[in-house]
Image (cartoon, coloured by chain):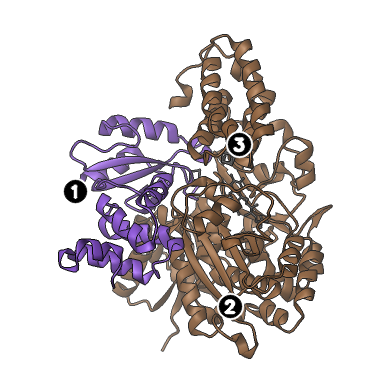
Amino acid sequence: MLNIYTMRRGIKLMSDGEKALMDLCTSHGNNAANLLEILHDVQHENGFVAPDDIHIIADALNLSAAEVQGVISFYPDFKTTPPAKHTIKICRAEACQAQGSRGLEKNLSTALGVKMGEATADNHVAIEAVYCLGNCALGPAVMLDGKPQGRATVDGLLAQVRKG
Amino acid sequence: MVDKVKIYIPDDSSAISVGADDVAQRVAEMASAQNVAIDLIRTGSRGMFWLEPMIEVETGAGRVAYGPVTISDVDRLFKADFTSGGDHSLALGLVADIPYLAKQDRVTFARCGIAAPLDLAAYKATDGFKGFEAALKRPQADVVADILASGLRGRGGAGFPAGIKWQTVMQAEAKHKYICCNADEGDSGTFADRMLMEGDPFQLLEGMMIAGYAVGAEVGYIYIRSEYPAAIDKIKGAVEVLQDAGLLGSNILGTDFSFNIKIRRGAGAYICGEETSMLDSLEGKRGMVRSKPPIPALSGLFGMPTLVNNVLTLAAVPSIMADGPEAYYAFGQGRARGTQPFQLAGNIKHGGLVELAYGVTLRELIEGYGGDTKSGRPVRAIQLGGPLGAYVSASALDTPMDYEALGEIGAMLGHGGIVVFDDSVDMAQQAAFAMEFCAVESCGKCTPCRIGSVRGRETIEKIIAGECPSDNMALLTDLCDIMEAGSLCAMGGLTPMPVKSAITHFAEDFTRSDRGQEFDK
Ligand SMILES: Cc1cc2nc3c(=O)[nH]c(=O)nc-3n(C[C@H](O)[C@H](O)[C@H](O)COP(=O)(O)O)c2cc1C
Ligand code: SF4
Ligand code: FES
């Protein structure tokens, strides 16, 4: 399919990744209303949305790059840098606070030597804040690499991320 | 050949979060090693989370339960012949006799935990699609009239009468209309939408179909928060099953009615639960709150009349249509009719889902069902209705749970979340968190919310540090008033509720000098 982006860059210069991304946008009807779905799909595939992707998506959806960037920056889910090997999302909301999540957060962050929202220097583990995972009767609740864990403990989490 | 023993283990994500998948795998391995023929069925959760992972076994007398089961318990369960209902220290007896469950008024959650969530035959065998079929035989206006007569109010937080909203959308003239199911469930202490989507997804879809028929919409969207990947998968699966069965698509059941359902994922923003922010997000934009009017019922998604309802509101609809509005109205009291799925969370021994008619007291919920705190220390504070809801003290325990009674004590029911704290809680810290949460989640459109929340948090921190406490307290009160009066939506407008209620009911925490490491434990 030809659009402004392919015309500007010339079809020959398109990499497989660019082609795949354009196909993805096409499968979403090149419809700007599906931008969040497209970003989720890109992130599922690559772990993050690379700066170059933003231009391709913007062209395909007939949006400005700023508009796409604006959406990415609004939503905490979207990342523009490669994710750590393991991500621990720690629930910070009230029901988990009542079950000791503040202590979990503090001790885990000390043990890993990272602040909330940061990754270890080798990008092996990152900790992120979330506000409620819908597991409020079995707190402290976390999500490790997308999998929910209830009654989380520092030792349990460290053992899992240190496995590899 | 002997019949296979039916064994039920939840695949609800809370149950999985404490090991249900591992337990299920171990049960399958042991059964095959011991030549016990079993039929392992993964279901939703019954909502008794302290007993998860809970295993149920079909016996001649009914289903018996064991829980909470860990992998290492499985071998001993087989030794105790649990596949025939044998006795064991984890045995809980007949599921139907467990008081926590037996005493509830399960209407919306009647099916949750009983059969495989995507088993359409099982759904139909338990009155599934009876409500939809009944609705299709009647004029649209009659369906709307039934919703009005049932007394159903929105379960998403504001408690707006569902029938009035349906009527507005039905009467609007437009080329397209939409149903938007709000499955953003961001309130701390709430998980009922998640449980329902994972455990009985067809009921929600049936509710959306009835709504689509009643208001004249051909497309329904479900906006599900990305924190709920299992619910997203279940709903996707359920939509496919209904499409394959011809229950979604064109000319459903040979009628003129055509309807389809699309799933959209949120992306981690709490504000997108606010309905107009959700609509912007569904249009692929930043989730900025819109000013009203126009109301979404007249100009919503893509500028078209849009019915926005919460998961629980829509999921209550099939039973109203199947059993009649009177049956639903018979539950509850005053202007709070029907049942409310209360969610017991936080520091509580028996956390879980308790569906009851409105009017039950907070005490019955927390002491009777919840068994008091998990820590064994006294209950000190309870937050009702999510992060924008009030903190109340133990003196409020005898308040009946209905919209008006809670309003009288300056609280609200919200989405039905009840979060319990014991006496180690520091309420000044909780108030600071309420402001912090608002600062993190504000859409940024209006100043009192965007900046007021940051200043609010700083001011409370100054009070905690003992810096000019009375001046700062006056400043904080003034700031709360400005946020209440000057915010476009309830994010900024209600953040003062947890803050002010903490000050009113727990004033001593704002002047404490012995503030220690206690809350950092
Ligand atoms: C900040 C904020 C967050 C909200 N979050 C949710 C939510 O997660 N789910 C929900 O159903 N309603 C939420 N609401 C309420 C919705 O705006 C809307 O009233 C509701 O979805 C309407 O459906 P109902 O009438 O069935 O309750 C929120 C409101 C505000 C102000
Ligand atoms: S009150 Fe806050 S969240 Fe609501 S519109 Fe204003 S800035 Fe946005
Ligand atoms: S408050 Fe932590 S999971 Fe809900």
Which residue lies under the disc numbered 3?
Answer: B492
Task: Chain letter for brown, please.
Answer: B
Is B518 in front, or is B58? B518
Mark 2–mark 3 distance (CA, rounded to whole Å): 37 Å
Label 1: few (<14), some (14–19) or many (≥20) C-alpha neighbours in 10 Å = few
Residue type, numbered disc 2 = Phe
Q: Is mark 3 within 8 Å of ligand 2?
A: yes
Residue type, numbered disc 1 = Gly
Q: Residue at x 37, y 61 (%)?
A: A38
Splitting the image into 4 quarters, where does residue B174 fall?
A: bottom right
Q: Secondary structure at mark 1?
A: loop
Q: Colour of chain A?
A: purple
Chain letter for mark 3, please.
Answer: B
Residue type, numbered disc 3 = Gly
Q: Is residue B502 left or right of residue B160?
A: left
Q: Is the same chain shared between marks 3 and 1?
A: no
Chain letter for mark 1, please.
Answer: A
Which residue lies under the disc numbered 1?
Answer: A164
Q: Which quadrant, please, contains the N terminus of chain B?
A: bottom left
Q: Residue at x 35, y 70 (%)?
A: A26
Q: Is mark 2 within 8 Å of ligand 1?
A: no
Q: Is residue B391 visible?
A: no
Q: Is residue A14 left or right of residue B391?
A: left
Q: Residue furthest top?
A: B468
Which residue lies under the disc numbered 2?
Answer: B259
Instruction: Determine whether label 2 and label 3 are within 8 Å by CB.
Output: no
Is A144 in front, or is B41? A144
Splitting the image into 4 quarters, where does residue B487 fall?
A: top right
Q: Which quadrant, please, contains the C terminus of chain B?
A: top left
